[in-house]
Amino acid sequence: MLSNDPARTIREEAARLEPRLIALRRDIHRHPELAFEEHRTAGIVAAELSRIGIPHRTGVGGTGVLGVIEGARPGPTLALRADMDALPIEEETGLDFASTVPGKMHACGHDIHTATLLGAAEVLAGLRAHLAGRIVLIFQPAEEVLEGAPAMIADGAAEGIDMAIGFHNHPDKPVGSFGYVRGPSLAASDRFDLHLRGRSGHAAHPYAAVDPIVGAAHLITQLQTVVSREQKPLHPCVVTVGMMNAGTTYNIIPERAHLRGTVRTLHAEARDVAEAAIRRLVEHTAAAMRLEARLDYQRKIGPLVNDDRVLEPALASLRAHFGEVVQEGQPSMGAEDFAAFAERAPAFHLGIGAGAPGRNDRLHNADYQPDERCIGLGVQALSRIALDLLR
């Protein structure tokens, strides 16, 4: 691929590749794989990188794939990352390329992401002569469980990286648009398991038992004060108990209760405050209710912070290539393990509009049907940003 106008080349190559990339996406969509099961998907990625002539390594962090494009001149190293895993959801789209695996579906569009990064890889491989530096292509497993990025990093995927770009499709934005958030854009995600132990007994004689269900009910309501009475009003925080399991029938007070929940924060201070408050509330509420309590509190992934050193030139590239279709958005309390890469190098996470006309879609939805035109547009966006960062 030779051209004195790389921007034109990017547009033309993205258009040429789009039918093939859509076909790849549909093949991956038919065969969804959950976290750390992405063997078939990783095989497709490896085969495509081999066809393009990009050196790569498989089995990174379990089922990840790492490719490298060397530019013509020395320069910084830019990482481009896509996730590959699906969700445990029964697909209800009725599409002719719907999932063939019961109970599994690409309901978050990671099939879109994988195809998009493969397209950008092919375009950028053809633009090597214009690049000063190197591009590391990261095809990552297990984003949905927030474990794939740390696993790949532990296996060397972040070594030598000077900048990182991640991206995600957005059904709430029309296809052809792009979005960004300054600073903290996605929340830290922590989780807890709380085990309460009392003393079982007959429901007719509660004084002879120690009821973990009543204790759990008190704790569930008390935990809401972590947000309303512990955090600064301008520090977003969410504490949600998503599971409670206790008891077997109508007339028995059980011995045990088990709660599971998640904590989401955008700031380090709020994260520390939430954990300390939850530990204190569990300890003292359990004591007041005569219960034994065991709290397993896990910090999963930190907040995803967009760095202006990457964000600003990326926005300039997008506007130069697409015009004024780039819109500033608001932070979300959802989580994304690309944050682990952003902790190691200045990073930017791009939102790519994927909303189809006439649909009101959402992620993690059994009927999710993104507009596939977002693939070619995503290829253009990633390629132009990478080209300009490594000119």
Image (cartoon, grey):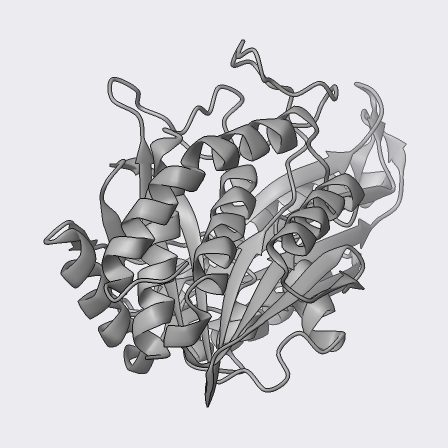
Say whether residue 140 is left or right of residue 181.
right
- Where is residue 64, by image quadrant? bottom right
Q: Residue 235, position in %: x, y?
A: 33, 69
Q: Nearer the viewer, residue 174 or 221?
A: 174
Residue at image point 74% right, 63% down = 295
Identify whether 258 is placed above or below 1. above
- Where is residue 19, by image quadrant? top left
- Where is residue 251, by image quadrant? top right
Q: Residue 284, position in %: x, y?
A: 65, 67
Residue at image point 47% right, 68% down = 303
Residue 147 showing in the rendered view:
no
Identify whether 365 is placed above or below 97. below
Question: Given the current orientation, which residue lies at the most extreme bottom position?
Answer: 74
Residue at image point 51% right, 58% down = 121
The C terminus lies in quadrant: bottom left
Question: Given the current orientation, which residue lies at the most extreme left position?
Answer: 324
Q: Residue 338, position in %: x, y?
A: 53, 64
The N terminus lies in quadrant: bottom left
Residue at image point 11% right, 53% down = 323
Q: Residue 183, position in %: x, y?
A: 31, 72
Residue 314 showing in the rendered view:
yes
Q: Nearer the viewer, residue 293 or 378?
A: 378
Say whether residue 207 is left or right of residue 186.
right
Total number of numbered labels?
0
Q: Nearer the viewer, residue 123 or 85?
A: 123
Say whether residue 328 is left or right of residue 70.
left
Identify whether 144 is placed above or below 234. above
Identify whether 325 is placed above or below 391. above
